[in-house]
Amino acid sequence: MTHQPDEYRATRSDNNQIQLPRDLVTELGFKLVGWIKTIWYYHSDQNKVVLGGTDAAQIESLEAVSENNIVGVDVDDFDAGLHSGGRITIPQALPDEPLKMLESSNRVVLKPIYAIDSNYDQTIVSVYPEPEYDRGYLDATSRSVIKSGNQTTVVSQHTNSV
């Protein structure tokens, strides 16, 4: 079995697009009317956004917000596994707080929960603004401060659940 990364990092472009790596396009993408698509969901208890396919709608804690084309992926290439990834646009339909956090961040963290490692039928991916994620400022993050002499270390533990 191939190693599956715990997280991916991606740049947010000026037009609010995020580049999804090949592996995540394969995991999240589905075909609909000549396009490869994914769906943006909102998790209100954790105030975060999640990417998934149609099966993610069965997860009670997720509310579907917007269906999104994965730009740059040809349907035939998707079927053959020959694509190299694609771009998705952050939808304006997201709730204000997570939308503003994502739009104000130059980079995002994509944290997958792989179907093979969970009770879900399909992989889902939490999307976090990188600065807040790295500093441990998100609801799904606990922070510990360890002081030793003149050194202070902050340890962040990220819980990725839905």
Image: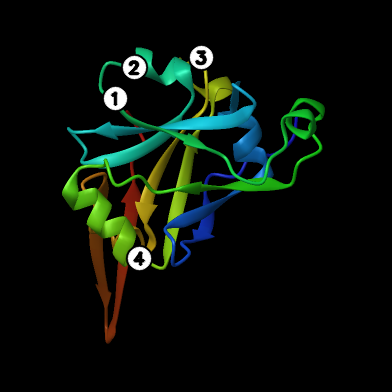
**Of residues 150 and 13, which is closer to you in this image?**
13
For label 1, the residue is: 62
- Residue 139 placed where, x, y %? 21, 46
Q: Is residue 124 left or right of residue 129?
A: right
Query: How many angstroms separate mark 3 from mark 4 (CA)?
Result: 31 Å
- Decide which of tag 3 and tag 2 comes sooner along the chain: 2
Q: Which mark is residue 121?
A: 3
Placement of 106 over or under 54, stated as above or below: below
Secondary structure beneath label 1: loop
Kindly indicate the quadrant of the structure image that contains residue 159: top left
- Decide which of tag 3 and tag 4 comes sooner along the chain: 4
Q: Nearer the viewer, mark 3 or mark 1?
A: 1
Query: How many angstroms separate mark 2 from mark 4 (CA)?
Result: 28 Å
For label 4, the residue is: 105
Please say if the residues under marks 1 and 2 sit with CB atoms less than 8 Å apart: yes
For label 2, the residue is: 59
Q: Is residue 158 left or right of residue 54?
A: left
Secondary structure beneath label 4: loop
